[in-house]
Amino acid sequence: QEGTKVPSKRKQNTSIVTSDLLHKNLLKSEQENWNDISPTYTAMTKRIKEKLEELHNMYTLNSGSPRMRFGENVYFEENGCIFLAKADSVDEGNADILFSIEELGFSDAFIQRIRISPDQRYMAISLKSENSEEATCIIMKLASFPVVEKVIPSVFSFEWAANDVLYYTTQKNLKCQNVFMTTFTYQKQTKLVYTEQDARFFVDLYCTKDRRFLTINSNSKTTSEVWLVDCRHPFESPALVQARTTGVIYHIEHRKEQLYILTTYGEPAEYKLMKAPVASSGKENWQLVYALEKKTKLVDFEMFSDDCIMFLKNAGHLYLNVISFVSHSVQSIKLPTWACEFELESHPEHTTSTCYFQLSSPVHPPKRFAYSFKENNLIEQAVQEVPIITNCHTTRLLAKSKDETLVPITVFHNKNSKELHRRPLLVHVYGAYGIDLHMSFKEEKLMLIEEGWILAYCHVRGGGEQGLSWHRDGCQHNKLNGLHDLRACITLLHKLGFSQPKHTALAAASAGGVLAGALCNTDPALIRAMVLQAPFVDVLNTMMKTYLPLTIEEQEEWGNPLEDEKCMKYIKSYCPYQNIKPQCYPSVFITAYENDERIPLTGILQYVQKLRKAALDHASSTSKKGNWIPSIILDVQANGSHCDSSWEHSLNE
């Protein structure tokens, strides 16, 4: 076009070099700032560290990790080692060691996933280091002396299709798009079996409970497609269950020649259990087995030979639904009121008559429970000598948001605390991707309770706490609902006498930084401090950069400002970075990671710089004596990747 100058290569390169230099200078000045400030906290750091180590030794070390049961054998992991024991005598003393991270020279890694082959002759393990998103898969041959058979780099998920046939997906730039099959006996070979072409879709693998099919699952944030590999014929090409249909999510289980399908298909667009014959699996043949009640979140689902169990959450309470395929009955079992988080233990054998799982909360260490189909009851496993926290009170509240929607809040405080309005309060928020707030046990949360703090978890829209519609009502052009919800939650807490603004801190990680950062701009007087970990604070600029690894697939969460003017204006209205202005801000502490592939560090550096300037501008323009200037601190960690760390790393942090 006339009058349009084509930018020369040199100009582009110059601007890249300039922004790199700017990034380096900003990073250097933040590191110097942190080095000046951190000595102030030495004494407090020492006290907190000792207290956390004491709690860790008392609770977590004794609670044991989840176990994998295989007939008489039980596999479990402790301190970077994998053990094999007999089912009747499970502890390190009576167990054989199959694998040790240290011995293989992966000292900074942790075990992420374990899969045992059907005949228990092979074990596949993935190891992940803290500084990388990608894991390494190690296949061990389990003889009397286990040996490493094969090492595969950059693996995301893997499953055994047969005794010596392993399927796995590879991960590159945070994307999983290829599925491979590899064999260990006869003619050893590796071949590509599936490739996903659409950048919004992510591929992972799963084995049905009865080991009849291996499923290749291709999912975007809103849509899925599943291919089946028949485990009796693992070399045959995968078969399609149902071609992807925009807005329909589905997952597959199998029992007696029927596919059991967990899906959002049909109205309302919440999860339902449906079934169809293997031979005619298209959605026109799907028949309803069970539909979830309104505002219910499906947390997990486990298949057994004659029953299935749904782990559900409703208004913050956890319960089980046991669906019998024989009597067609549905039984609901409420779980203890303190429980906030489930973890299902692995039951590779679907014929078992007992389902084992762990329950925990931010202030309750994991406790093991079992549900028996025969006895039809819940059994608390009293194996652990872990003292249960008795002096902590759990309260569930509902806050009325701007549009009258009721938003659940879970509150924890010490039963012996007097004058709660004078106590410090730590509020947690996330509200994105349909993911629930993380509520498993953390030593530091228990420490705060013991120190007299109140902890509040705000289950705002955008998260998944009340089912799929709860997410839909808080994403894309509904993002502001999450902000209104958060404001309503904090206001209600103060009104009910839980702390007050000058003693309130707000904590968020990753995408939770959007709502926390937005509230900090719109209602800074509601809180005195904000703590963010690897926060997403520059939504607009990030969503404009399609070369970043996640931007395209993230459009289903935030919208596409490049092609939609309305969307751009909407993001601009709440984006934390875009809305910083001179006013009295709370103090802010941010932890970020230098090599974070998900949240670009540049955005965080610029956010901190702009926030600090706005706070200083406000202080200098108002001539009041003793004007309060907030501390705005950024700690950039050289190690660690996005919000995923070992006990040692999180302790130091």
Image (cartoon, rainbow, N blue to C red):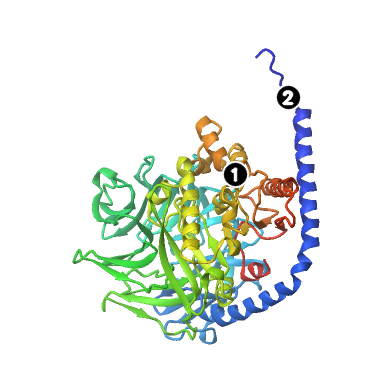
Compared with residue 243, is residue 105 higher up or lower down, i.e. above or below?
Answer: below
In the rendered image, residue 457, in percent from the top left (x then y), is placed at 49, 62
Direction from residue 383 to residue 281 in the image, left or right: left
In the rendered image, residue 432, in percent from the top left (x then y), is placed at 49, 51
User: In what element is the residue under mark 2?
Assistant: loop
In the rendered image, residue 153, in percent from the top left (x then y), is placed at 61, 56
User: In what element is the residue under mark 1?
Assistant: loop
In the rendered image, residue 487, in percent from the top left (x then y), is placed at 50, 53
- Whether pointer 1 and pointer 2 mark residues with C-beta atoms closer than 8 Å, the reply is no
Looking at the image, which residue is at 59% across and 65% down?
503
Please tell me which residue lies in front, 151 or 332. Answer: 332
Within 10 Å of disc 2 (Cα), the crowding (few <14, some 14-19, many 20+) is few
Outermost top residue: 2
Direction from residue 32 to residue 376 in the image, left or right: left
Numbered circles on residues, count: 2
Name the residue that disc number 2 marks: 7
Direction from residue 604 to residue 345 in the image, left or right: left
Please tell me which residue lies in front, 385 or 429. Answer: 429
Within 10 Å of disc 1 (Cα), the crowding (few <14, some 14-19, many 20+) is some
Compared with residue 121, is residue 95 higher up or lower down, i.e. above or below?
Answer: below
Asked where in the image residue 344 lies, by quadrant, the reply is bottom left
Direction from residue 67 to residue 278 in the image, left or right: left
Name the residue that disc number 1 marks: 549
Q: CA distance from mark 1 to mark 2?
A: 25 Å
Residue type at tag 2? Pro
Compared with residue 144, is residue 200 higher up or lower down, i.e. above or below?
Answer: above
Looking at the image, which residue is at 77% across and 29% down?
11
Please tell me which residue lies in front, 511 or 12. Answer: 511
Q: Is residue 533 visible?
A: yes
The quadrant in which the C terminus is found is bottom right
